[in-house]
Image (cartoon, rainbow, N blue to C red):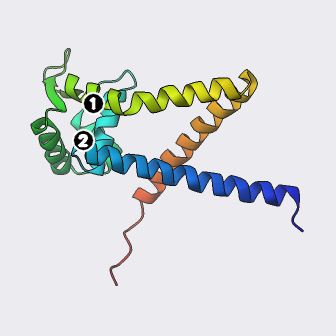
């Protein structure tokens, strides 16, 4: 017979595996509907979120692990599809910033907002404010773990081909 902490650990691991799988499945559907690849989808997400900062080609290259040439090719694809535009920085005319178009914002809003709205409704109807604080902290910490793990993986050499 297993102990309660061991059972909870198994259930948490199972729930995390289910969650990560469902996120991957959702990303694949977004890719299909938007007509982009995974890197392009992630770039759109970064540009749209913005976090109050101007998105530059160099910043995208760093976040996505691309070379400058790779970032340029990505931006060319997204610009051709009407999802992004490149403009000069408002205060430093030597710099280029990347902005999402209304088309990109509208399409992603149509595809993602229902999920976010339903998630929010489910959370606030099911959990108490103190529990919601814990849930928000959990997602923030998991995001930080992902960021740190991505940085660690980026320093590794790829596996050799068999």
Residue 79 image offset from top left, x and y in percent? 13, 36
Is 67 on the left-hand or right-hand side of 12?
Answer: left
Q: Tell me if I can see residue 101 in this picture.
A: no
Q: CA distance from mark 2 to mark 1?
A: 8 Å
Question: Please, what secondary structure does the residue beneath circle 1 have?
Answer: helix
Which residue is label 1 attached to? 107
Q: Specify which label sits upstream in the sequence, 2 or 1.
A: 2
The quarter in which the C terminus is drawn is bottom left
The reply to whether dot 2 and dot 1 touch (C-beta < 8 Å) is yes
Nearer to us in this view, 20 or 56: 20
Q: In the rendered view, does 126 fall on the left or right side of 158?
A: right
Residue toward you, 149 or 100: 100
Q: Residue at x 75, y 24 (%)?
A: 130
Residue at the spot of label 2:
34
Give the residue displayed 32% in from the left and 80% down from the top.
Answer: 161
Measured from the top left, where is residue 64 in percent x and y? 32, 47
Q: Residue 147 appears at what percent x and percent y?
A: 48, 45
From the top left corner, tell me how far across and down residue 86 is, in percent. 14, 28
Q: Is residue 25 left or right of residue 86?
A: right
The image quarter in which residue 83 lies: top left
Q: On the image, which quarter does residue 158 sit in?
A: bottom left
Residue drawn at the location 66% of the way across and 33% of the way down: 135
Q: Say which of 143 and 36 sits in front.
A: 36
Give me the disc on residue 161: none
User: Residue 5 vs residue 34: left or right?
Assistant: right
Q: Is residue 38 above or below residue 123?
A: below
Say whether residue 121 is visible.
yes
- What is the secondary structure assignment of the residue under circle 2? helix
Check disc 1: other Cα within 10 Å, few if <14, some if 14-19, many if 20+: some
Quadrant of the drawing holding the N terminus: bottom right
Residue 101 occupies quadrant: top left
Q: Is residue 147 above or below residue 118?
A: below
């Amino acid at each position: 017979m297993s102990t309660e902490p061991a059972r909870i650990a198994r259930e948490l691991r199972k729930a995390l595996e289910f969650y990560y799988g469902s996120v991957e499945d959702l990303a694949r559907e977004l890719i299909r509907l938007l007509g982009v690849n995974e890197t392009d989808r992630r770039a759109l997400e970064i540009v749209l979120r913005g976090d109050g900062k101007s998105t530059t080609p160099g910043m995208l290259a760093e976040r996505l692990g691309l070379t400058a040439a790779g970032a340029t090719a990505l931006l060319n694809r997204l610009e051709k599809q009407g999802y992004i535009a490149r403009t000069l920085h408002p205060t430093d005319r030597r710099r280029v910033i990347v902005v999402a178009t209304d088309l990109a914002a509208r399409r992603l809003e149509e595809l993602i907002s229902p999920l976010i709205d339903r998630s929010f409704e489910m959370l606030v109807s099911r959990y108490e404010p103190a529990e919601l604080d814990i849930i928000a902290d959990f997602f923030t910490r998991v995001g930080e773990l992902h960021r740190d793990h991505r940085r660690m993986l980026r320093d590794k050499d790829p596996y050799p081909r068999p």
